[in-house]
Image (spheres, grey):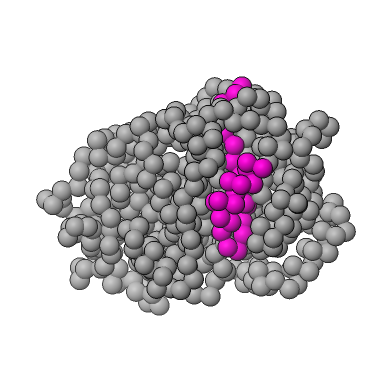
Amino acid sequence: MEFTGATISAPFGCRALRGGGPLRTPGWGADGRRRRVSSGPGAEQWRSWKVSCVATEKPEEKAAAAAGLGVDFADEEDYVKGGGGELLYVRMQATKAMDSQSKIASKLLPITAETSVLDLIIIGCGPAGLSLAAESAKKGLTVGLIGPDLPFTNNYGVWRTNSKISVWRAVLSMSGRILLLIARCHEAGVTYLNSKVEQIIESPDGHRIVYCEPDQKILCRLAIVASGAASGKLLEYEVGGPRVCVQTAYGVEVEVEHYPYDPSLMVFMDYRDCFKEKFSNPEEENPTFLYAMAMSSTRIFFEETCLASKDAMPFDLLKKRLMYRLDAMGVRILKVYEEEWSYIPVGGSLPNTDQKNLAFGAAASMVHPATGYSVVRSLSEAPRYASVISDILRNRVHSEQYLPGSSQGPSPSMLAWRTLWPPERKRQRSFFLFGLALIIQLDNEGIQTFFETFFRLPKWMWRGFLGSTLSSVDLMLFALYMFAIAPNKLRMNLVSHLLSDPTGSAMIRTYLTL
């Protein structure tokens, strides 16, 4: 589950909620309710039900496991981005039935074999792809959207004050947002093909040829990949970049006998530790926290989240932790409506900005490395990026006249890449990568101290950090302020991390050279 804009930390202790309970976030009223879901199994049946998903170690075993689920990956990093050892759960989440979301093919006109050369093809039908398609078509471009006709199944929330798109402040369910985006695509004349893209190549005349299953090819002037983080088959990424880490979360919407929090408020980040005795093995010690959002006084969405780890925390373990936490809080589950498995790759390399295929959203590494947030950034940047794409295409000079290294200037695709990843954005990202590397090294006590310090910062600072709105200079001020108010142990961790971790030197180098 992803939230953008604000977050609240919680103090220590788990069983007793009186005294210093977790701080909570107001503002989730009736318009913040999530989508309706179909009824699931009963509580006892659900507690005992489990799907086994074993991570394999050998590349050929990984490839075989992925092939068995109908997916394939470009390399090891792409495999991790696509789900890794938790791939079965990721696929289960992606293929959920969602009656509340219409099929895209029922709303958009089809791309046909007779279609002439399109200005733009966008590959991927999530929030990033849909928003960019709608904005680009509004600029007068002929836009085709290609990707599997699957619903957006992860639960998602956004702070009203963080959304720059005013109409969405009153429509907070992701199902509603997807329907709005599809409607905007329809109004703008976007066409659609329900297919999987196999490759993109350049034709002799400079056009892009998009090859789709089964044996279809579509011509366009520019192609943009917005099909999620695991897009290594269609894009090239920088070699030698930071390692991909993973945020995993297990969520469940349930009917409960008693809800210990105020149902008018949302519990955003309850990091209280009640697992010391229950989960003491080294592989089980990564800190996790609780989201809790009330649909009513007794119908609640709970989610146990591992903010980031080098290797994905298994969903089975997250489920056990959530059940143990709820038991410790005295929460009794009466009925289960829905389960959710959220898998978000964070960090990793940027796309190679010399390539002619473009990207947007998670495929363009736009996920916040230290939080996993990305959707709001994609929605906010879609109008500007669409304007740049429109300007490039209206002044189009064939790409062979602007080869990399040519004295005549950058190619159209390079201009687009520079818009998406200017030096300022790269400086910000280097700071976030430094934060990610620090977070994955902290134990539960360390992460609690970190967030207690984090939320003592001025509100504009921590909100700006989470929302990716702080400039690179602001982030330096953020770092100095946090160091000034941090306990000595955390100060020592920060200094040691800056001097010893590769992300520290990389951040300094990026700030000095860009």
Q: Is residue 84 above or below residue 153?
A: below
Question: Residue 183: x percent and y percent?
Answer: 33, 33
Residue closer to the observer: 134 or 317: 317
What is the span of residues highlighted in magenta in the rendered image?
Answer: 297-324
- Which quadrant would the N terminus be assigned to in this image? top right
Q: Residue 215: percent from the left, percent from the top?
A: 17, 60
Q: Is residue 414 above or below residue 3?
A: below
Residue drawn at x 46%, y 70% as measured from the top left: 76
Q: Is residue 419 visible?
A: no
Q: Residue at x 46, y 50 (%)?
A: 51
The answer to which quarter of the image holds residue 302 is top right
The verdict on residue 304 being magenta is yes
Q: Nearer the viewer, residue 410 or 471?
A: 471
Residue 186's spot in the image, x, y percent?
A: 28, 36
Residue under the point 69% across and 53% down: 279
In the picture, measured across the screen, residue 259 lies left or right of residue 204, that is: right
Q: Nearer the viewer, residue 253 or 498?
A: 253
298 is higher (above) or lower (below) than 193: above
Residue 390 pos. (x, y %) = 34, 51
- Seen in the image, is 453 located left or right of residue 389? right
Outermost residue to the left: 114
* Quadrant position of residue 432: bottom right
User: Along the line of sight, which residue is nearer the eye, 61 or 351?
Assistant: 61
Quadrant in which the C terminus is drawn: bottom right
Asked whether residue 109 appears in the rendered view, the answer is yes
Q: Residue furthest right?
A: 488
Q: Is residue 210 magenta?
A: no
Residue 99 image-quadrant placement: top left
Q: How many marks are shown on the rendered structure?
A: 0
